[in-house]
Image: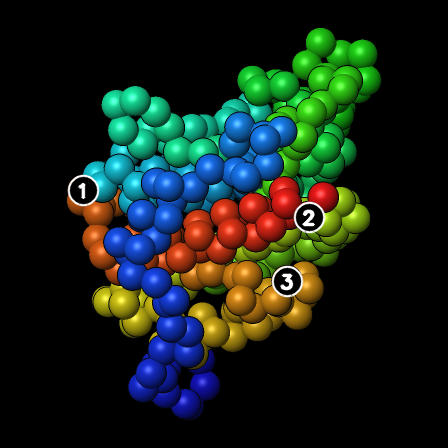
Amino acid sequence: MGGGPSLLSKPWRDLAHTNEENLDFMKSYHPRNKEVKNLRILVHGPVGAGKSSFINSVESTLRGRVTGRVMTDSISGESFTTKYKTFKIQKDPEGFYSFIFGDIMGLESTEKGVNIEDIKLALRGHVTEGYKFIPGKPLNEGDKDYISSPTLDDKVHALVCVIPAGSISLLTDEVVKKIRDVRLVASDMGIPQFAILTKVDEACPEVKKDISNVYKSVYLKKQVDRFSHLHGIPPNCIFLVKNYQSEFTTNDDIDAQILSALRQMVDHGEDFLNNL
Ligand SMILES: Nc1nc2c(ncn2[C@@H]2O[C@H](COP(=O)(O)OP(=O)(O)OP(=O)(O)O)[C@@H](O)[C@H]2O)c(=O)[nH]1
Ligand SMILES: [Mg+2]
């Protein structure tokens, strides 16, 4: 890590809102565009990056207790998520939050992972919930899981790339290219894009010791800049996150990271829906 200090004396990013403000914002959020019921956020990225864990973490934060509804796997190697699934999060006994997450199979260097044609189809709203990805064989027009005339409600309104903070320089050229291809399609459609750099605890010992150090870590700041440079996503759309995974209870610092990321996604997704 070189000879310099590993922690800055002040965080390089200040969170714009308190957790309460962000929670209130999420609770009262409804898309203004009447063509859509929910803001749809699609999560993609390499196998085992923490995509499903991130969706679980959002749910844990919003519900105030650690939940584990989305299945995750610790023996990574091949993608654990193989179906296209969407998740709504319960707001109160009467209903759900007005944003939903789409979870997909992970990207791999080889044909074994999700086919990027399938991700492109999901962006455009052609993929039915529950569709089982078949590596090497993308969904085709005419297949039973192919939605031929998707509405705005079926389409994706915000795209999130999930990558472990410590693996950015380890991604293979193939995976980098796949991420870029997906991003270009999203850019063409005007879909706002974000990145979540996960496993910040594993990537930086100072953060493992104290999660509130996350925006002071020199190493993690470098990873944000590196990812931004490599994938053309501005640093203010890249977030450092420790997912809930071994914790039994939620914690304000982890919640703060997750809520500020979620708020940006919802804010930009809402702008996208209003500027079509
Ligand atoms: N230490 C640490 N482990 C994490 C974090 N996020 C996820 N993990 C672990 O990483 C492993 C993979 O997480 P998943 O959420 O299943 O990853 P995924 O991207 O959905 O993987 P696929 O569906 O297989 O593509 C699990 O063992 C998680 O507990 C994190 O922030 N910190
Ligand atoms: Mg998964």
Q: Which percent across, then down, holds residue 162?
A: 53, 49
Q: Is residue 69 shown left or right of residue 50? A: left
Residue lying at 52% horizontally and 32% vertically, measured from the top left:
38
Which residue matches tag 1? 248
Vertical arrangement, residue 36 with respect to residue 49, above or below: above
Q: Nearer the viewer, residue 129 or 3?
A: 129
Circle 3: residue type: Ile
Residue 5 point in image, percent of width and height:
36, 87
Q: Quadrant of residue 124?
A: top right
Which residue is rendered at x = 68% and y = 64% of the image?
A: 232
User: Which quarter of the image is occupied by the C terminus?
Assistant: top right
Depth check, front residue: 156 or 160: 156
Q: Give the percent coordinates (x, y) of residue 57.
A: 35, 43
Q: Amino acid at mark 2?
A: Asn
Amino acid type at image mark 1: Phe
Look at the numbered disc 2 and give the secondary structure of its residue.
loop
Q: Badge 1 local density, few (<14 within 10 Å), some, or many (20+)?
A: few
What label does residue 275 carry, if any? 2
Mark 1 vs mark 3: give the one in front.
Answer: 3
Instruction: Check disc 1 and report its element: helix, strand or loop.
Output: loop
Q: Mark 1 or mark 3: which comes first in sequence? A: 3
Above or below, 30 relative to 261: above
Q: Are marks 1 and 3 in contact (CB under 8 Å)?
A: no
Q: Position of residue 188 (x, y in %)?
A: 79, 48
